[in-house]
Image (tube, rainbow, N blue to C red):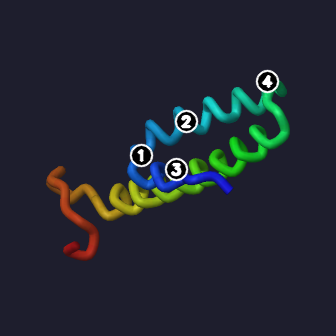
Amino acid sequence: MTNNSDIAAMSFEEALAALEAIVRGLESGQQKLEEAITAYERGAALKKHCEEKLAHAEARVQAIVARADGSLALKDGE
C-alpha cells in the first residue's frame, strides 16, 4: 500500500494533474507490475479526493441562489 497522506492537502487542480500523469504512465505500459499497482492505488485515492472536492464545490454552488433583484443569497438562510 502506498502513502497517500499528501493527497488530502492537494487542491483539486493539483490532484487532477497528478491523476492525469498516473493515467498517462499506466497507458504507456512501460511500468513494472508493482509500480503499476502502486500507481493505480494512488490514482484511486486521487480520484476519490477529486470527487470529494467536486461534491463540496457543487454543494457550495447549489447553496447560492439568485434573488429576484439580482443579488445573491444562501439558500434557506445559510
Asked whether, in this view, residue 20 is left or right of residue 59, the answer is right
Q: Which residue is mark 4?
A: 28
Residue at mark 3 to residue at mark 2: CA–CA distance: 11 Å
Contact? badges 1 and 2 (CB < 8 Å): yes
Residue 17 against residue 77 in the figure, above or below: above
Front residue of this view, candidates 3 and 67:
3
Pointer 1 local density, CA inside 10 Å: few below 14, some 14–19, many at least 20: some
Residue 34 against residue 61 in the figure, above or below: above
Residue at mark 4 to residue at mark 2: CA–CA distance: 16 Å
Contact? badges 4 and 3 (CB < 8 Å): no
Asked whether, in this view, residue 1 is left or right of residue 72, the answer is right
Sequence-wise first label, 4 or 2:
2
Sequence-wise first label, 1 or 4:
1
Which type of secondary structure does the marked residue at label 2 adopt?
helix
Tell me where residue 14 appears, x and y as whole percent: 45, 37
Q: Which residue is mark 1?
A: 10
Sequence-wise first label, 3 or 1:
1
Q: Nearer the viewer, mark 3 or mark 2?
A: 2
Q: Tell me the amino acid under the disc marked 1.
A: Met
Q: Tell me the amino acid under the disc marked 3.
A: Cys
Q: Which residue is mark 2?
A: 18
Return the residue found at the far bottom. Answer: 76
Which type of secondary structure does the marked residue at label 1 adopt?
loop
Front residue of this view, candidates 27 and 52:
27
Sequence-wise first label, 4 or 3:
4
